[in-house]
Amino acid sequence: MVLIAEELSPATVDALGPDFEIRHCDGADRTELLTAIADVDAILIRSATRIDAEALAAAKKLKVVARAGVGLDNVDVSAATKAGVMVVNAPTSNIVTAAELACGLLISVARNIAPANSALKAGEWKRNKYTGVELAEKTLGVVGLGRIGVLVAQRMSAFGMKIVAYDPYIQAARAAQMGVKLLSLDELLEVADFITVHLPKTPETIGLIGDEALHKVKPTVRIVNAARGGIIDEAALLSALKEGRVAGAGLDVYAKEPCTDSPLFTFDNVVATPHLGASTDEAQEKAGISVARSVRLALAGELVPDA
Ligand code: MLT
């Protein structure tokens, strides 16, 4: 029995094949999840389902947790390993899609596309109010030059942006080959006109862009987070926006999701989307097929290759 706990692409079920009975549940509903997981061999999730020690304890037959996406922050991997449950993900399935959304937020926040759209649809033709800034010749600070950060850097350099990055795990020479200058986080905060975050959520990255960091940035900086909520501290960002220490933000992720009511949403210069980073037809199809294959292999006792 395979439990699909979130909305996944139809290709996922096709890729699982005819050999499994499939059950659906709403993984964000804890009571429903804990009941539905009890007798399944595998569970397929996205980011709304928390697989923690409690869920693992309730899952008496579970062999595989399959995360149709990159991040594993909603899965307690060490508890799963202790319980003998394999955890698989689809680490490259949505990197282009996530990078494209970050680029979209950067452009939108530079040019006030979202508030101008809302104003015009409400009958207001306000050309001066929504004057923006150019991207060309500006410095983009990429925080985290991993798979997604690199794709954002490549795409935004096509707009004529100068790219600097902070990533303690990357060699300066490797970054230089990509035309990216590596800086310390403090240096990046000081020089960047735009900042985009591409880090996993870990104890080290939560609050990395917090009050102290947001006192080091240029007041004209525009900040994008399409990685994970909480890496940019929301209270610190709110104060920085209120005090004019940050000129705008593009947010796709939130410390607590779903998030439908945030004081950040009251700012015209905050563009907000509901965790859409991985949400394209292409990425969902790739992620679904990839994890469905891994589940099939794992349940057949075969080796699951790194995706
Ligand atoms: C990811 O980590 O790949 C995304 O957050 C996936 C998702 O949107 O569920």
Image (tube, helix red, strand yellow):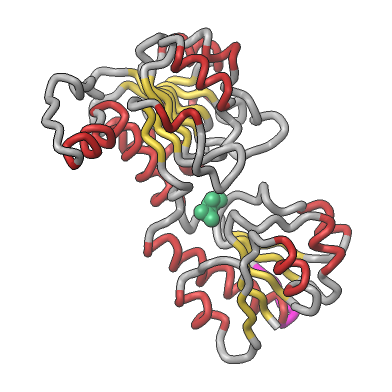
The extreme bottom residue here reads 18
Q: Quadrant of residue 121?
A: top left
State the image coordinates of residue 25 (x, y, percent, origin top left): 63, 72
State the image coordinates of residue 150 (x, y, percent, origin top left): 43, 37
Q: Quadrant of residue 139?
A: top left
What residue appears at the point 53 percent right and 31 percent down from the top-left corner?
144
State the image coordinates of residue 16 (x, y, percent, origin top left): 57, 81
What residue appears at the point 52 percent right and 15 percent down from the top-left corner?
239
Q: Main secondary structure of the magenta part?
A: loop
Classify 72 as above or below 28: above
* Magenta stretch bounds: 300-304
Q: Is residue 177 visible?
A: no
Q: Quadrant of residue 299?
A: bottom right
Classify 43 as above or below 79: below
Q: Which of the image's four quarters has the N terminus?
A: bottom right
Left or right? Give the position of 127 relative to 147: left
In the image, 168 versus 126, the foreground residue is: 126
Residue 2 sits inside the magenta stretch: no
Q: Is residue 275 visible?
A: yes
Residue 302 sits inside the magenta stretch: yes
State the image coordinates of residue 233 (x, y, percent, origin top left): 59, 25
In the image, 3 versus 134, the foreground residue is: 3
What residue appears at the point 47 percent right and 24 percent down from the top-left corner?
165
What residue appears at the point 59 percent right and 31 percent down from the top-left corner?
231
Left or right? Give the position of 106 relative to 215: left
